[in-house]
Every structure is written in structure tokens, then in C-alpha cells.
Image (tube, helix red, strand yellow):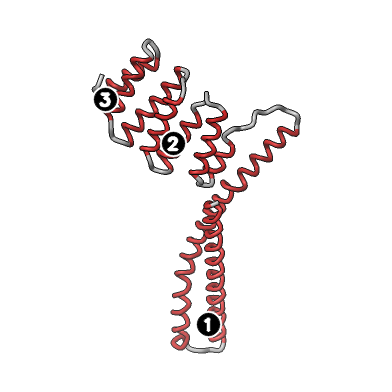
Amino acid sequence: MKGYIWMAILALLVAGSWYKFNEAGKEATQLEQKIDELYNEGVPDEEIAELKVELNSKEGPRIFSGILLTFMSAGLAGILFATVILPMLAEKVTHAVYDSGEEVEPDPFHEARVFMAQGEWDLAIQSFRKVAEQDPTSRMPWVEISKIYRVNKEDPQAAAATLQAALEGQEWEVDDATFLMFRLAEVYDEDLQQRDFAAQILSQVSELFPETRHSANARSKLQEWGMA
């Protein structure tokens, strides 16, 4: 909802700015016509110099405003396409496929991705949590939630807590468990500046899953850090 409110405010600002821009254009046109009429009447340049100065003072800001408004309008159009038109097109394509008789698996992340496109991060997190409840074996909802906390909400502590909770919440397949552990180590190393703790996580990978490519990757990273 917040995304739509901001988009409506931006649309009103753009519309108001275009109105003022057009009004300024009308004033400039009227000045040009008046100057032309005075020229045709034979009025000396000295007597219409003030009108020329006034005209020039309006043209510069108007040109700049026109460029700025063009970019604002393009931005509004891009936001409108990403948040409204694109989801509608995706839904129409989905219905077209269903109507054709083909069986297609519904996308469990569709709602969450729509919220993300609208910048509704909290709603997206809630939607991903619902998917995690429906499919506890999927690591992707937890990965996406941690990414939102880390990148969009700039809260690496919450990102780490999300991954930790996912790891402790159930028994994972080896590939899923190690993927979550590597992401957790990445958050501690890159965002929380706690490389020692990240190294502990990688050491756990090596100890829990020996003789696997995951263990080899963990040891390689530890060697890179000089902590093997």
C-alpha cells in the first residue's frame, strides 16, 4: 500500500510540474508575440529590451525544468510498469497457459515477488514465511528473507538471525544445510565484520561434512583468510 501512495504522490507532483511548465510556455509565447508586434510597429529595440530580458529569464529555467520533468516522467513510467503493468502481464500469461490446457505449477513466490517489486519489504517477508511453512524442505524462502534484511532493510543482524533460525529449525539435506551455513558465514564476515565467527561456521562445515566438496570449499576459504 505504501508503494502505491508514494507512486500517487509522485504522479501528482509530475502532473503539477507539467502544468506549471506549460503555463510558463504560454507566458513565453505571449512575450514573443508581443515583441514581434512591437517590432512590426517599428518600436526601437531599446524600448523592447526589457521584454527581451524577461523572455530570456523565463527560457533558461523552463528548458531545465523540461529536462528534469522528462526524467521524472520516465521514472514514474518505469515504476508504474514494474509495480502494476508487469505483474498484470505475468498474470495474463499465466492464465493464458492455464487456459490452453497445459499443466503448470503455480509459482509459490509470486505474491512475495510482487511485494518486493512494490518495495513492501515487510509484506514480502511475511509472504516468504508462509511459503516456508507450506514447504519446510525449501531453503529458498529463508535465503530470500535474509537477503531482504541484508540488502533492502540494511539489517544484517536480522539476516543472520533468520539463517540461524532456519538451520536450527529442522534437519536439512547436506546441500541445503551447507548453502545456509555459507550464507551465514558471509553475513558475519562481510556485514558484521566478525570473521572469527564466520571461520567457526566454515570449520563446522568441514567437520560435519568431511570428504565433500562443501568441506573442501570451506577449507579453501579458511586458507584464503589465513585461518586454516
Q: Position of residue 164 (x, y in %)?
A: 39, 29
The residue drawn where x is 49% and y is 44% is 122
Q: Which mark is residue 225?
A: 3
Q: Nearer the viewer, residue 27 or 175?
A: 175
Mark 2 vs 3, N-terminal side: 2
Three-letter amino acid code of the residue under disc 1: Ile
The count of marks equals: 3
Amino acid bearing label 2? Lys
Residue under numbered circle 2: 147
Q: Residue furthest front?
A: 169
Q: Secondary structure at mark 2?
A: helix
- Dot 1, crowdedness within 10 Å: few (<14), some or many (≥20)? some
Residue, far top: 211
Secondary structure at numbered mark 3:
loop
- Left or right? Give the position of 186 relative to 130: left
Q: CA distance from mark 3 to mark 1?
A: 75 Å
Q: Which residue is mark 1?
A: 35
For the point 39% across and 33% down, which residue is it? 161
